[in-house]
Amino acid sequence: GDHFPVFASGLDQWQSLLRLSLSVEHPNATSRIWNAGLSDGGLHNMFLSEDGEMWLFDLGEPCLQTIPSFLTKFLMSFFHTLGMEEDETGDWVVRFEQDGSSGRLRPTERTVELQADAIRAFNVTVDRIVAELFDGADGVRILLLRYVVTQLVSDAAFCIEKWRLKGGGDELRSDHQDNLEKWLWRALWDVYVSEELRRRYLAREMFTRQAEGRGPGYRK
């Protein structure tokens, strides 16, 4: 279809994403809302106090946005927060470990557990958003997913640029910085989880199409 692949490369990615965003005709997907400065309203920018107060920070400039774009930072933050979880030293938790036999990187056991929880929460949230804000309109789910995947890859690029600006790869400059590797680990997590979302969506789409092709009379 016109909306595949979900994560194309080069110019094709942006052209197909633009076509997809223009193809969703539900009024809530095309009209704009005033975000009151919540342009970066992810979970990582929210704190809840014990007395029920919510604190927001690092949000961005007030502007008009479509609802799908307004929701992007919130939805991507289900996974982004795992890349920014702090350990006992105040550095970000490394989400990967090296396999003893193959030498390849793999998610830590704790990361696998948290990722499963995050994906379940993400799916439930997207289901509610699509049903209640967009009346189940076709195309909204994949549009939200593509926005989230693109945002995660964008954060990976941001992390690599931060690593480079702080002297990453330059022995003379990097000697004056502590734990520059954390930016690369966060970038790796962003790319890894964005690919997981893409892969899971394609698998779900494939199974759905196979079931539709079999028809109502199909039996296992």
Image (tube, rainbow, N blue to C red):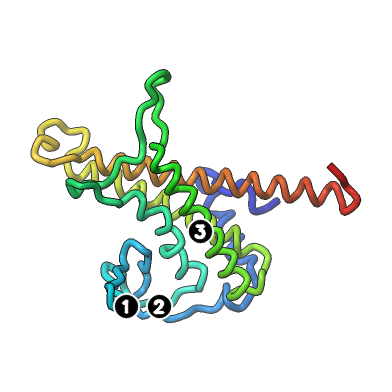
Question: Which tag, 2 or 1, sits closer to the chain's start?
Answer: 2
Residue depicted at 54% across the width and 61% down the height: 144
Nearer the observer, disc 2 or disc 1?
1
Q: Nearer the viewer, residue 39 or 75?
A: 75
Residue found at the very far top of the displayed protein: 101
Question: Which tag, 3 or 1, sits closer to the chain's start?
Answer: 1
> In which quadrant is the C terminus drawn?
top right
Residue depicted at 59% across the width and 54% down the height: 16
Q: CA distance from mark 2 to mark 1?
A: 22 Å
Type of amino acid at the residue the image marks with label 1: Gly
| Mark 3 crowdedness (10 Å alpha carbons): few <14, some 14-19, many ≥20 | some
Relative placement, left or right, of 103 versus 145 is left
Give the x, y percent position of residue 187.
34, 44
Residue ID for mark 3: 122
Q: Which mark is residue 52?
A: 1
Type of amino acid at the residue the image marks with label 2: Asn
Residue ID for mark 2: 35
Question: Which tag, 2 or 3, sits closer to the chain's start?
Answer: 2
Q: Which mark is residue 32?
A: none
